[in-house]
Amino acid sequence: MRVRTLSTVAAVVVAVAGSTAAGSTAVANANLYADTLITQVDKQMSLPVGLREFSFVVRSDRITNRDFTGTLRCSARFDVRRVGDAAPPGFVGGYLKVGFYVGFAGTRVSCEGEVTGDTISGRTRKTSVTCRPAREPATLVEATGTQSGGTGTAALRLSPLSFTCSASPAWKLSRTRTDAAFQAVTKNIRGQMSDVINKSVASAFDQAARGTNLPPA
């Protein structure tokens, strides 16, 4: 009786170990697939992406200062990275799906332009602005196909973006007006970057998925 019990326990251990190994392999295959797509996306997005020129203004708040105005011309250089493990492939509603999250922590937006109104003379001067993601936004990418080993399509669900920006040389404004100026800049950058990711980056993922075989389910 004891021998039978030990044999049963051993069989369960072997089954659990096999299931764990299979799960690890599925995750490894999903990660490899995700990384393959990301590598292709990084190649497609390797050149800086130009953003639309925009202007902003921070109104004078006392008689001792002027309206602060600026015009910026920006470009973005993308750095897409996987965040965490990809989900093991599985069939949902008859379709094979692989999901994973990506982040843009290494992405940079660089701007050149002119500002006026932060000096006593009121002269226009050159300015450089650099913006970086303020945190790691986890954006979902989901690839969909009909069978293991076949190609598929990919869709992207963007999480809200936030940026922090700095200017060189520093703008000579009060803390309140500096915050207002950067709020205006980051609002515009956030909107334009969201558009680029939802269009260009999403399209790059879809193109990569159409040429890459899905991992086995």
Image (cartoon, rainbow, N blue to C red):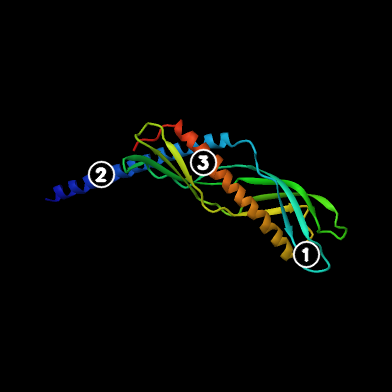
Q: Give, as a three-letter code, the residue at label 3.
A: Ala
Select label 1 or label 3 by which is in front. 1
Position of 161 with respect to 214 (left or right) is right
Task: Give above or below for 83 relative to 217.
Answer: below
Q: Give, as a three-letter code, the residue at label 2.
A: Ala
- Residue 43 in percent (x, y) is at 57, 34
Q: Quadrant of the C terminus?
A: top left
Q: Secondary structure at mark 1?
A: loop
Task: Give above or below for 142 relative to 124.
Answer: above
Quote the CA–CA distance across marks 2 and 1: 73 Å
Residue pushed farthest left? Answer: 1
Q: Earlier in the sequence, mark 2 or mark 1?
A: 2
Residue receiving disc 1: 60
Residue receiving disc 2: 15
Circles 3, 2 touching at the beta carbon (< 8 Å): no
Q: Give, as a three-letter code, the residue at label 1.
A: Ser
- Residue 208 in percent (x, y) is at 49, 34
Which is more toward the observer, 12 or 54?
54
Residue receiving disc 3: 202
Identify the image quadrant of residue 116: bottom right
- Mark 1 Cα shell of 10 Å, populated few (<14), some (14-19), many (≥20): few
Identify the image quadrant of residue 52: top right
Q: Secondary structure at mark 2?
A: helix
Task: Give above or below for 170 relative to 86.
Answer: below
Q: Earlier in the sequence, mark 1 or mark 3?
A: 1
Position of 70 with respect to 190 (left or right) is right
Position of 78 with respect to 217 (left or right) is right
Task: Give above or below for 143 relative to 176.
Answer: above
Circles 2, 1 touching at the beta carbon (< 8 Å): no
Which is more toward the observer, 137 or 7?
137
Select label 3 or label 2 by which is in front. 3
Q: Which mark is residue 132?
A: none
